[in-house]
Amino acid sequence: MNEVLTALASAAPMAAGWSLHGLRLRRRLQAARRDPLTGLPGRAAFTALARRDLRAPGAVVVLVDLDRFKTVNDTHGHAAGDAVLIAAAAELRMWADALGGSVGRLGGDEFAATFVPRPPGALRYDVQDLHDCLSAPVPFRGAELRVGASIGAIATASLPAPVLDVALRRADEAMYAAKREGGGWRIAEGPVPEMTSTNGRRTGRPGTTTPAGGMR
């Protein structure tokens, strides 16, 4: 009996060490899946969260692209651009958390989010609220940086099935339409793309090819 107790006692520190190692490993993996600047989930991590969120009835997918972001970078420098991205990420996180959704940074000044309107008919009000939050000036070294946001949204209830890729494509189209109109927001309806595709993406997106063969 004493030998058994001795063996268990000697094994306890080793087990605790492996447990601590596993916890550290999980934290490192989680950190690797997050955007280092904003702390938001990156594209892959957001995709996993969004697919889970889309199981909820009435779920909405949102795509956000900041307005005048390049102007801020060119005029005030990359530190100012970073400040804008961090502020936008914080606003998006608070907004999504309040609505039980998720948010991620897809790259550059582009973000995506999911949420369920409360009440169900509040979609337009929720999107307007997000636009107002993202349009607030960002303090930076004694100045105020003013950007806006172009937002596209799609309620998955208007799709045959809550498929994330389709929802993101339609939200992207709505966002692009809003940006062409000078900013603001637009809500897409239905699964049929309104714009042409190139290489499986909306024509005009970075990485797509124009009919003449050039890159946009």
Image (tube, rainbow, N blue to C red):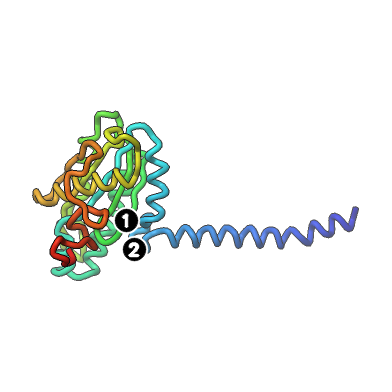
Where residue 204 sits: x, y (%)? Answer: 17, 57
Residue at image position (20%, 39%) is: 187
Where residue 147 sits: x, y (%)? Answer: 16, 56
Q: Is residue 141 left or right of residue 102?
A: left
Q: Is residue 36 left or right of residue 70?
A: right
Residue at image position (37%, 60%) is: 35
Which of 19/161 is in front? 161
- Residue at which label 1 appears: 105
Residue at image position (16%, 63%) is: 143
As displayed, is residue 111 above or below residue 121? Answer: below
SS for dot 1:
strand
Q: Does the CB distance between marks 1 and 2 fall below 8 Å?
A: yes
Front: mark 1 or 2: 1
- Residue at which label 2 appears: 37
Residue 4 occupies quadrant: bottom right
Q: Quadrant of the C terminus?
A: bottom left
Is residue 94 visible to the viewer in this orientation of the structure? no
Which of 2/19 is in front? 19
Which of 183/97 is in front? 183
Amino acid at the residue labelled 2: Leu
Amino acid at the residue labelled 1: Arg
Looking at the image, tell me whether mark 1 or mark 2 is earlier in sequence order. Answer: 2
Query: Quick one: which residue is furthest to the right in this view?
Result: 1
Residue 127: assigned label: none
Where residue 32 sits: x, y (%)? Answer: 44, 62
Residue at image position (30%, 54%) is: 89
Q: Residues within 10 Å of mark 2 (few under 14, many from 20)?
A: few
